Image (cartoon, coloured by chain):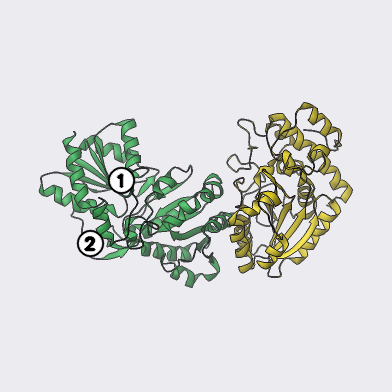
Chain colours: A yellow, B green
Amino acid sequence: MSKPTTAELERIASQVRRDIVRMVHAVNSGHPGGSLGCTDFLVALYFHAMNRKDGFDMDGKGEDLFFLSNGHISPVWYSVLARAGYFEVSELATFRKINSRLQGHPATEEGLEGIRIASGSLGQGLSVACGAAQAKKLNGDKNLIYALMGDGELEEGQVWEAAMYAAHCKVDNLIATVDFNGQQIDGPTEEVMSLGNIRAKFEAFGWTVIESNGNDMASIVSSLEEAKKLTGQGKPILNLMTTDMGYGVDFMVGTHKWHGVAPNDEQLADALGQLEETLGDY
Amino acid sequence: MTKITYTEKKDTRSGFGAGLAELGRTNPNVVALCADLVGSLKMQEFIKENPERFFQIGIAEANMMGIAAGLTIGGKIPFTGTFANFSTGRVYDQIRQSIAYSEKNVKICASHAGLTLGEDGATHQILEDIGMMKMLPNMVVINPCDYNQTKAATIAIAEHQGPVYLRFGRPAVPIFTPSDQKFEIGKAIKLIEGADVTIFATGHLVWEAIEAEAVLAEQGISAEVINIHTIKPLDTEAILASVAKTGCAVTAEEHQMNGGLGDSVAQTLALNHPAPLEMVAVNDSFGESGKPAELMTKYGVDAANIVKAAQRAIARK
């Protein structure tokens, strides 16, 4: 099967953004800002970059795996998983409702296809990704591990334990991406807790660092291709990806105010007016 | 029943090391992780024989729990090794989210539990770990009593699908369980048959309970001694059957009274068969530096205190 073009990926992303704002609006809760910012990346990952098998099994042998460490952006992941065929898109309507498999933060308990570990309490995903990457090596499996973290999440100490470990153990089948949107719940990261030079920090820890524009589909696709070429060379790969929180909905862009707030009816209509329905709403 | 004796003392952590080494030879999916305490955890044999299946994490226990969870994805059975303190309290949220809630097949193997860690003092003497671990849904909690049982438990938990907390200790203690005794998770073991009081003991306190029984026998008191090696799932059937016969009980453990075996037994009795219960456990206090035996005496968790507790329990019938 041929890979979708950049234009085709952008059309999928438009639908995913519609899904996100509709899901969050429906339950008046959830995290639209980071979800919209990372939409292009997750679409490129699942529809272009990752080597994926049909169906889902927990061990994921013989395919690339993805771990979402910043679990609060579950809306974008659920939408991308559904649009990629892991489960019916109609199930997106159950997000955050009682008896749903689509928990507020990703969970494995109800067996939702595509999810391999719970996340939401921040800072844990890079460690998990390191373990999964080393399991692949033990199994002689040449496929890759991808992980996504928030930038505010880098304030958690465990991230740096994992960063040190991945370099020391030469976990070079791992491509971790940081969603560098400069925002966290209490305000801009530079005000809440300055992250300093993220690139220099990861390089000092022994990682190979690349940079990308996370709201430019062509930039994301080429950076993921570049990252793949850099694997297998003894170093873990960090993709420092600049995004705008809330990208795609003009009144949500670039502010932490839409981190964990749902749009009201008028705001939803405004947002949907800016996002083309390309694959059919759920 | 024949009198329970011993000829040799050995640390339970060495039982873990021996069990892990055997798993290394028999189960290719077993992998081991350690946070800079290889010697203390007796993991050298496994590492020597399976270097590619050992992961040195350094002093980063939170990372170790996450890596262990990740290794299960791909079919590995990770055994993490560090002190009980760093295996639980330090990493509670990592265990909660990445292992227990995520139903990952990780075996958290915890040495130097309780007061018998000794001279290092209260910073390292965790007495709350059983409580923390038993509160987590999906978690199995095991506290074996001697070298043989720790070895058998280590081997047995590899066959159990799901997270397990395995607690053991530092000092040499009597070896009195048969070396060929198969370990059954959740199945209490009756060591001494009795009629007047049941002593439910776990971990290092099982041997103390055996000694207490001999003292009680001299006083004309017939005590039943049951080894509760698995605190969760608790063998409520064995507990209720015994107390139905004896009419009162004592629990004995190297742990806080809050959250320990005593809590679990009290809950079982209160819900099913209320009966006098006395608890031998540390009473809402941290430990301190000292020799293990001195500490067990000072904090009231030894054979002498089990004897007194049995007398109190019988008097309340």
Residue B68, percent across and down? Answer: 54, 57
Mark 1 vs mark 2, CA separation in Å? 30 Å
Report whether mark 1 lies on the same chain as mark 2: yes
* Residue underneath mark 2: B6
Residue A50 lies, in percent from the top left, at 75, 54
Image check: A153 left or right of A278?
left
Q: Which badge, 1 or 2, comes first in the chain's sequence?
A: 2
Label 1 element class: loop
Q: Is residue B222 visible?
A: yes
Residue A150 in view (yes/no): no
**Quadrant where the C terminus of chain B is found in the figure:** top left
What amino acid is at disc 2? Tyr
Is B131 in front, or is B163?
B131
Q: Could you classify mark 1 by the number of other residues whose Cα lies within 10 Å: few (under 14), some (14-19), or many (20 or more)?
A: some
Q: Looking at the image, which residue is at 69% across and 30% down?
A: A28
Residue B249 location (% of width, % of height):
24, 40
Q: Position of residue B35 (x, y in %)?
A: 49, 63
Which residue is drawn at the image coordinates 47% and 55% (left, top)?
B107
Q: Nearer the viewer, residue B231 or A60?
A: B231
Mark 1 residue type: Asn
Q: Residue furthest bottom?
A: B48
Q: Which residue is depicted at the point 63% across and 33% down?
A: A100
Asked whether, in this view, residue B148 is left or right of residue A279, the answer is left
Indicate the chain on which mark 1 is placed: B
Mark 2 Cα shell of 10 Å, populated few (<14), some (14-19), many (≥20): few
Residue on which disc 1 sits: B283
Q: Of residues A264 and A89, which is closer to you in this image?
A: A264
